[in-house]
Image (spheres, rainbow, N blue to C red):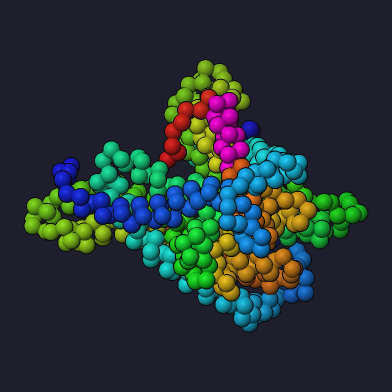
């Protein structure tokens, strides 16, 4: 009997977890002028408004571009250090892991402030996108690292040894043996870096270049003054993109992503 | 085993990451300390000399001390709510043999995948004066004027608990999965009821997970920016909101830095006090 109470309790918690996400998606199909739930009639009008809103469209393009650049840089750096950690770090293995997870454990708002001052101090400022991209690389690095290092742990060094005894040089061993075997971890980490970069707010908010806005920033600005369902449409599209990326990782590639 | 090579080549693999972490994390953090003792600027973010003006301003104004207390109070409440709400879920996920486990697990992770702005926005839709909850209650005739759910501490606690719940559930779930089920079975066979098993076996043995979860949630709660900014509005401000205001809106960089440092130090002291009170064995969460 108490088992049933537990299940019931947990179902309530799951409802609590999904409620705000559900409400946003449902509200986006509202036909009325104001944000109400349940919606007053169904319509896609707010999606049309959103897609015709040049400000939001520019923000989406910026977000996608920043996320793509971040993903490439973060994946390259994170993969290299994960290989080092599992294969070569020796006694420093645990220390390397803690250091790599540091950006995840430090409050994002502090990291953002620290970088803001630093960029001004070295004269980079926020005139270009470079600062924001560096910030994104710092906070996405742990995710790439976790995924690749997990893949490295399950990769049997005997394969590499066999290739070496057959005369394969270091580069060949890397491209023909190691990389194909840890590919799932690399792709999982890369997509995760993309998602985190696409969704993150605080880092972008403090480090954004003048006149450049990512989607979460634009949404935040919009929400401070507007209450139309357009924001719900923007949010729903953003959620849909993330869900598609995760489904692609888990179903399409059959990967298990290490998020935590 | 691959023989360890004397060569330094493998270090090159770690070099880019080391540069990023040192140049773009360690040095900038050290720089905050420097910034906090700069003299306040006059039309500029900071002045030419050094001074303790920022710290004096903080400690001489009761407003800021009250705000720190308020932020810590919200953090503690969120941690407690997340623990009470999260523990049964972690138990079900860690022990449950239900077929739906995969789906439940996905639901717990789902909030992590939706941007923080969107999740906070969802709560404004639910909690606002014309939001789902107030509107429904009014239509059912249960209330006449809207309940004050938003623009106050209550709304911030509700929304932050939601945002941070996965960080409580996941470590506890990991700890519970690591407990040998035969311990519970043995207790049951010796006549212990479910409640006794929970109190005497599961709770003590999952303590490392509970401690990790509490610390993560507390630290993230007191430093959260987006959720308090959107839900708290202009009336209730947490430290993180004040810090960002000081930096972005009023360009008081030394003061903002001092606030950020003070918040970090107080947060760290709370974590240490908590760890000592619960006799935590320090181990890095995996």
Find the magenta span and give its range.
B264-278
Q: Is residue B55 above or below residue A134?
A: above
Q: Is residue B156 left or right of residue A57?
A: right
Q: Is residue A29 above or below residue A1?
A: below
Quadrant of the rendering where the C terminus of chain B is positioned: top left
Relative depth, front residue between B37 and A164: B37
Q: Is residue B154 magenta?
A: no
- Which residue sits at x=59%, y=65%? A216
From this viewpoint, which residue is outermost toward the right? B144
Quadrant of the rendering where the N terminus of chain B is positioned: top left
Q: Is residue B273 above or below residue A171?
A: above
| Image coords of residue B91 (percent x, y) | 55, 36
From this viewpoint, which residue is outermost toward the front? B49
Q: Is residue A248 above or below residue B159?
A: below
Q: Is residue B273 magenta?
A: yes
- Which residue sits at x=44%, y=60%? A137
| Image coords of residue B118 (percent x, y) | 63, 61
Which SS type dominates the magenta stretch?
A: helix
Relative depth, front residue between A170 and A116: A116
Q: Is residue B146 left or right of residue A80?
A: right
Relative depth, front residue between B131 and B78: B78
Asked whether the viewer can see residue A111, the reply is no
Asked whether the viewer can see residue A174, the reply is yes
| Image coords of residue A124 (percent x, y) | 48, 66
- Which residue sits at x=72%, y=65%? A224
Q: Residue A168 falls in which quadrant of the image? A: bottom left
| Image coords of residue A135 (percent x, y) | 48, 60
Q: How many marks?
A: 0
Q: Residue B285 falls in which quadrant of the image? A: top left
- Which residue sits at x=34%, y=61%? A76
Q: Is residue A155 left or right of residue B186?
A: left
């Amino acid at each position: 009997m108490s088992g049933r109470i537990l299940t019931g309790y947990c179902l309530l918690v799951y409802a609590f977890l999904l409620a705000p996400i559900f409400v946003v998606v449902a509200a986006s199909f509202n036909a009325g002028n104001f944000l109400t739930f349940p919606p007053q009639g169904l319509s896609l009008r707010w999606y049309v408004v959103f897609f015709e809103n040049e400000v939001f469209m520019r923000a989406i393009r910026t977000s996608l571009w920043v996320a793509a650049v971040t993903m490439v840089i973060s994946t390259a750096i994170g993969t290299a250090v994960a290989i080092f950690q599992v294969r070569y770090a020796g006694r420093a293995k645990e220390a390397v892991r803690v250091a790599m997870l540091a950006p995840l454990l430090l409050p994002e708002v502090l990291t953002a402030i620290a970088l803001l001052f630093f960029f001004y101090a070295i004269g980079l400022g926020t005139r270009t996108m470079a600062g924001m991209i560096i910030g994104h690389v710092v906070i996405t690095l742990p995710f790439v690292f976790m995924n690749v290092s997990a893949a490295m742990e399950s990769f049997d060094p005997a394969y590499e040894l066999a290739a070496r005894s057959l005369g394969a040089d270091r580069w060949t061993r890397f491209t023909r043996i190691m990389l194909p075997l840890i590919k799932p971890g690399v792709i999982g980490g890369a997509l995760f870096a993309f998602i985190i970069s696409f969704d993150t707010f605080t880092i972008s908010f403090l480090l954004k270049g003048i006149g450049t806005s990512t989607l979460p920033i634009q949404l935040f600005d919009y929400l401070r003054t507007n209450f139309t369902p357009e924001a719900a449409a923007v949010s729903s599209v953003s959620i849909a993109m993330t869900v598609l990326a995760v489904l692609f990782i888990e179903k399409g590639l059959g990967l298990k992503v290490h998020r935590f | 085993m691959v023989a360890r090579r004397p060569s330094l080549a493998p270090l090159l693999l770690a070099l880019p990451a080391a540069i990023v972490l040192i140049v773009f994390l360690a040095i900038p953090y050290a720089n905050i300390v420097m910034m906090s003792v700069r003299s306040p600027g006059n039309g500029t973010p900071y002045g030419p000399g050094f001074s303790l003006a920022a710290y004096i301003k903080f400690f001489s104004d009761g407003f800021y001390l009250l705000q720190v207390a308020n932020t810590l109070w919200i953090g503690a409440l969120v941690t407690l709510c997340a623990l009470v709400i999260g523990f049964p879920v972690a138990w079900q996920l860690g022990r449950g043999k239900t077929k739906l486990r995969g789906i439940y697990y996905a639901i717990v992770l789902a909030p992590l995948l939706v941007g923080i702005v969107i999740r906070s926005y969802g709560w404004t839709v639910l909690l606002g004066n014309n939001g789902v909850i107030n509107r429904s209650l009014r239509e059912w005739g249960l209330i006449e004027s809207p309940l004050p759910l938003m623009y106050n501490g209550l709304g911030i606690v509700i929304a932050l608990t939601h945002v941070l719940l996965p960080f409580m559930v996941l470590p506890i779930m990991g700890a519970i999965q690591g407990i040998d089920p035969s311990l519970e079975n043995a207790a049951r066979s010796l006549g212990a009821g479910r409640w006794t098993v929970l109190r005497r076996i599961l709770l003590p043995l999952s303590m490392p997970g509970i401690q990790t979860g509490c610390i993560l949630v507390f630290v993230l709660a007191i430093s959260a920016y987006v959720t308090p900014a959107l839900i708290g509005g202009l009336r209730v401000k947490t430290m993180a909101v004040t810090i960002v205001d000081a930096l972005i809106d009023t360009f008081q960089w030394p003061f903002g830095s001092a606030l950020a440092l003070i918040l970090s130090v107080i947060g760290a002291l709370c974590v240490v006090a908590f760890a000592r009170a619960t006799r935590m064995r320090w181990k890095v969460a995996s």
